[in-house]
Amino acid sequence: MAKYSDIKGFTVQTLSTDTVSNTGAAGAWSSGGNMNTARYTLAGVGTQTQALGFGGRTPSYVGNTEQYDGSSWTETSDLNTGRGYLGAAGTYTASLAFGGVTPPSSALTETWNGSSWTEVGDLNTARNEHAGFGATNTAALAASGYAGGMVAVVESWNGSAWTETADVNTARGDTGGGGTTTNGIMFGGYTPTNTGATEVWNGSSWTEVADLNLARKGLQGAGIYTSIIGFGGETATAVVGSTESWDGSSWTEIADFSTVRAEVGPAGTSSLALAYAGNNATGIVAITEEFEITPPTAQVQVEGQLFFNSTTNTFKETITDVPGATWSSGGNLNTARRALAGGGTQTAGLAFGGYDTALSGKTEEYNGSSWSEDGDLNTARAALAGCGLQSSALAMAGGSTTTEAVAEEYNGSSWTEVADLSNARDQLAGCGRQTAALGFGGAGVTASTEEYDGSSWTAGGNLNTARRYLAGAGLQTAALGFGGAEPTITAKTEQYNGTSWTETGDLNQARRELAGSGTTTAGIAMLGGPPAYTKTELFNGSTWTEVNDAGSARYRLGSANASTNQAALVFGGTNSGNTAATEEFTASLTNKTITSS
């Protein structure tokens, strides 16, 4: 018998798993030397091998200062004034400690020369729980914090005095942060509820960008404004060890502490970080953990590759029958925005709500080539859901100054408020038509499903997996829900039959804040993040198949979700900033991957 290699010129690989496109970069925490003084709410600067930790609570407020050499901590000169919840900037040999609580809230600033602390000019606003960062002890930023209430005040240090500058958008305390006085980032905290809000600083103003995946307070950060990790903290229910990585546009969950903690001391970079001391349910600890990024490994899938899967005892061939599916640019929205909703079709689309520089109620209609503005929503909001046609759409729930339950109907020119949903929420998905709509999932990581009949809402069957930031497609009695966060980003897909949800084939790419349209047997999942993707997948009723990528990576976008999977439309969203871009997807066939067993 002839050998396969003699016929085809190559041998068949034996693999224990199917090939994948790649395995992303990951990181892990490992144990370092314990601090001499267990404490929490301390501050720190430096690198993984040359760090400085100072201040904190034991539970009394202390000025203890310790130096780390990569393996152990050594006590050195104390702060002149012991305090916790303070800010820090600078390096191992030239750092700055400012603000905090003694109690009460303090405006004190001290500078470190490598061996001792010296008092210098006070903050203009005494506060604690603020974000502090800067590259040296002569250039620092103190942002937001608590001063008898949350303040949005930001002050800049020039080496001798503090000067007030532009306020943050969201006043909060107990945040993480990093960067310099011209390029910074602040994330998380509480307002007084926990938030995942992230803002970046360009030296003159703050801009809201993508939220943390896990809203929390008492977290810390290590790195710069385009590459930082946020770690530890406390949610509304528990102390956590979660670590998320920021790539300049979005957050990705990567690793947990070995010992969950909040209010730790930070140092290092996004790839070589240090977290020390802190507190959790067991009490105050002196634990140090070191973080290191491990490089990605790749196992590239090649079209036409034949292999034997030794786990399933099957031969498989990686053949993808790619149809003539293409993305092309459409006319831009008049107002760039993110977290918006939509309805309609590729040639008669509708975009409404979202966030531009503030919460928006703006509505725009698409005619296949350009957008025109029409009547605004009565309630400006973001992270809402939408469905229906251009002349008869429905806007569901969302977030404004509070989480909304409000619903509004669109008649082609104006919006009218109708019966509220039973459950206020944002970050939900929707599908169907104006008088037969479905809203499901949402903030609070809920599984709740609600059906609208044109006059009132009733409860439907719950999703099997509670989640938010998911996408929807289809009709009220034949719907598709996919992707989202639970709170980790998921690829799960479920089908709704008008009564209950059933799990089916997962997306190839787990993602959230994506867009969808089509039906339960011919659906389309578009883009999403984080990080921002261009990925597009088609659904045949049981499995998803990747097709041609879109031209512009983004998430928190809208779609004309009454479109088919052969003629779809997406618009708006964010990557490094809000976009007005519109793209049209056109395909003549449904893709399929052929597996031979």
Image: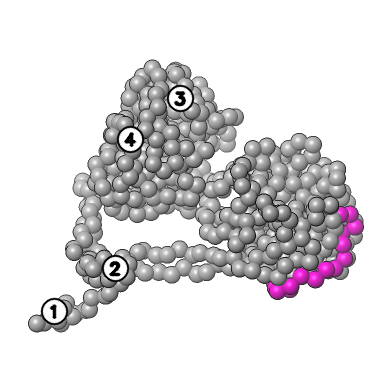
**Crowding at mark 3 (Cα within 10 Å: few <14, some 14-19, many 20+):** many
Res. 302 image quadrant = bottom left
Classify residue 281 as left or right of residue 471: right
Question: In the rendered structure, which amino acid carries the disc numbered 3?
Answer: Leu
Which range of residues does the magenta coloring cover? 69-82
Residue 394: image x %, image y %? Answer: 39, 25
Residue 438: image x %, image y %? Answer: 37, 30
Q: Closer to the camera, 93 or 542?
A: 542
Classify residue 531 as left or right of residue 263: left
Give the CA distance from mark 3 to mark 4: 19 Å
The quadrant of the picture occupied by the C terminus is bottom left
Q: Which structural element holds mark 1?
A: helix
Q: Are marks 2 and 3 in contact (CB under 8 Å)?
A: no
Give the CA distance from mark 1 to mark 2: 26 Å
**Crowding at mark 1 (Cα within 10 Å: few <14, some 14-19, many 20+):** few
Camera sees residue 412: no
Question: In the rendered structure, which amino acid carries the disc numbered 2?
Answer: Thr
Q: Residue at x 82, y 47 (%)?
A: 101
Residue at which label 3 appears:
421
Give the CA distance from mark 3 to mark 1: 65 Å
Mark 3 / mark 4, whichever is N-terminal:
3
Q: Residue at x 44, y 45 (%)?
A: 484
Outermost residue toward the left?
1
Residue at which label 4 appears:
500
Camera sees residue 476: yes
**Crowding at mark 4 (Cα within 10 Å: few <14, some 14-19, many 20+):** some
Whether 303 is drawn above or below 513: the answer is below
Q: Residue at x 25, y 42 (%)?
A: 522
Question: In the rendered structure, which amino acid carries the disc numbered 1?
Answer: Ile
Residue at which label 1 appears:
7
Residue 468: image x %, image y %? Answer: 47, 41
Mark 3 / mark 1, whichever is N-terminal:
1
